[in-house]
Amino acid sequence: MNRLLRHTALPLSTLLLLAGCLDVPHPFSNPGKGASKLAANAPPSRLDIPTPTDSLLPDAAAQIWAKDVASELLQQTIPAIAQPTRPGDWWLKMRAELRGDQVVPIYTIMTPKNQIRATQEGQAVPAAQWSAGDAPFFTLVAQDAAPRISSVLTGIQADDMEKDPHSLKHRAARVYFTGVTGAPGDGNISLARAFTASFRDSEDTIQNSKENADFTVSSTVKITPGPVGTLGHPQQHIEIVWRVVDKDGKEAGAATQLHDIEAHSLDNYWGDVAVAAAQEAAAAVKQIIGRYSGRDNAPLAEAGTKQPQPTQAANSTSNAANPAQPNQPAPSALP
């Protein structure tokens, strides 16, 4: 029977359930904006974006630029606010540089101590267009800037995690698995055992208590009547949800397995079905943890250097209406 597995903010992928066996592909990629917070190295409360004073713009237009960049960064799950810098906050210094007949927006990540952490350039635009820019124009400029800035912030986080011996870049994630509930037959036990066996490796470890756990994983199974079927073979619909929360109880992601089976075929023994389903779920949970924690992100280049342009920001400003595609790596929050 056809089966679908969904990962939060991911494309759907088809799985098969035939004669008690699963043919399991590996559909997981970007978990989306919900995966942007770190499990460790928690971000500060905000990124200040003061009105730029070196923008080649009148003050009113410069304010619009700052507000639009803050708005687009919020869409990238970056806690940005268009306001003067406040003590203890990271902030974004924006300026514009004239190069021939082109204007290049320049974005610099500043630490709370006013030290340059990284610099990223935006897409160059004609100088005349920049000077005459209206609100829709600066919205496009901000849409071009946001994925570039968030890419830099991702690198900064990864760099800080690299330097932190206690971060998940240097140790296995401690995972508390609460088990499986709601499954018919021996499903609760079979799924839980298979998941635990599939999950253990050098990156993650299952522990028996919630104390000091980086993440908690729980699974629920729900069965509802399915299609009537043909030739006297009614079906049931099964939904298996694997939910991952961080140490503060915030949801890191969820994987949902949906499938139709012959009615009551799992009322007793799950067998190979439990093994295959749990193996896929373990891979999904690892992907959620990896993305959410940021442990798989590449560290930033040397402080103060210009960063490589992210793939999703390669379009020209005129085509920046959709700067961040769903299948691009999720941006991280602030370091």
Image (tube, rainbow, N blue to C red):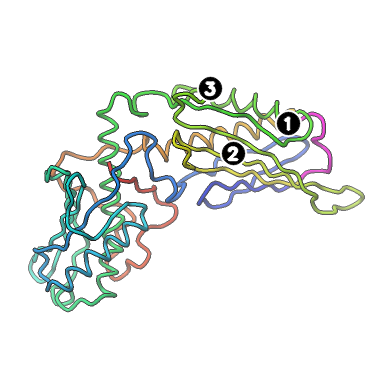
Along the line of sight, which residue is nearer the eye, 66 or 151?
66
Disc 2: CA contacts within 10 A as few (<14), some (14-19) or many (>=20): many
The residue type indicated by label 2 comes to Trp
The residue type indicated by label 1 comes to Gly
Q: Is residue 51 above or below residue 266?
A: below
- Count how many numbered circles sit on residues in the image: 3
Quadrant into which the C terminus falls? top left
The secondary element bearing badge 1 is classed as helix
Which residue is found at the position 28% from the left and 60% from the top?
A: 70
User: Which residue position holds label 2?
Assistant: 242
**Quadrant in which residue 293 is drawn:** top left
Q: Which mark is residue 187?
A: 1
Determine if the magenta segment contains residue 267: yes
Q: CA distance from mark 2 to mark 3?
A: 18 Å
User: Which residue position holds label 3?
Assistant: 209
Determine if the magenta segment contains residue 309: no
The secondary element bearing badge 2 is classed as strand
- Region rendered in magenta: 261-270
Along the line of sight, which residue is nearer the eye, 119 or 276?
119
